[in-house]
Image (cartoon, helix red, strand yellow):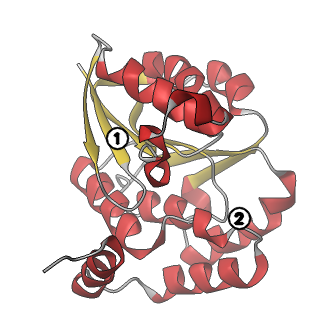
Amino acid sequence: MNINNSLIEEYIDKMSSDESEILASIARETYLHEIHPRMISGKVQGHFLNMISSMIKPDRILEVGTFTAYATVCLALGLSDKGKIITIEIKPELEDTIISHLEKAGIKDKTKLIIGNALEIIPKLNETFDLVFIDGDKGQYIDYFKAILPLVRPGGIILVDNVLWNGKIIDQPDTFDRETRGITDFNKYIQSCPETDVVIIPLRDGVSMIRKK
């Protein structure tokens, strides 16, 4: 019997724990009001992010690409009692939506939202991070990684979203657009990076789990 990806995804979704009412509300509002609602992590990936964060119990999390704060909430719920998540979003028009969702989830006091260009902001952060989630401009993944790695503690985890890019990473090079090229170059760069170990998890659109040595 041939089972296509959509059937597997439906099964995974059905067999995974339900999302909280807060996250379901954020997802619903995102699909109602945003142009590209599929950019949210969603139920299954959200559970994955929350589980990783809950296992690490990080004091500091960095997120690049907030969108409507679905993943932000999932990550923040695993913070230590005195923990904080710094999340960077380039689009100022999302600020009110993000703040509303952070307040609804009860994590606004544990969150520092910075609106602006992550590559300009990251070098100015005076923090050491236990956990990082990168989900920003795909064409800048290598630049994000190079800027962030010095701020990650040894043994810290970096999660990078969309590394399978809907399968386009295996297309012929002459068909690559900027984002596909960015992800492809990033995957190659990380695979040979001597400072880290990496595994790609085929969850949703692919997540790289990277551990700093």
Q: Is residue 158 left or right of residue 72?
A: left
Query: What is the crowding at mark 1: few (fewer than 14 residues within 10 Å), some, or many (at least 20)?
Result: many
Q: Nearer the viewer, residue 17 or 3?
A: 3
**Which tag, 1 or 2, sits closer to the chain's start?**
2
Residue at image point 47% right, 71% down: 42
Q: Which labelled disc corresponds to residue 162?
A: none
Viewer-side label of 1, 2: 1
Image: 97 above or below 193? below
Q: Is residue 148 left or right of residue 55?
A: right
- Depth check: 105 or 159 in front? 159
The amino acid type of the residue labelled 2 equals: Ile
| Residue 61 seen in the figure | no
Question: Label 1's element?
Answer: strand
What percent of the width, then of the height, locates residue 202?
Answer: 29, 54
Dot 2 alpha-carbon crowd within 10 angstroms: few under 14, some 14 to 19, many 20 or more: many
Residue 125 placement (x, y as % from top left): 61, 25
Residue 186 in picture, x, y percent from top left: 47, 26
Q: Are marks 1 and 2 in contact (CB under 8 Å)?
A: no
Examine the rendered structure and indicate whether residue 53 appears above or below residue 118: below
The residue that mark 2 highlights is 98
Q: In the image, what residue occupies the spot 70% across and 67% down?
A: 36
Look at label 1 and name its amino acid: Ser
Q: Which residue is mark 1?
A: 208
The structure residue drawn at horizontal position 81% and vertical position 66%, both measured from the top left corner, is 96
Query: Which type of secondary structure does the marked residue at label 2 adopt?
Result: helix
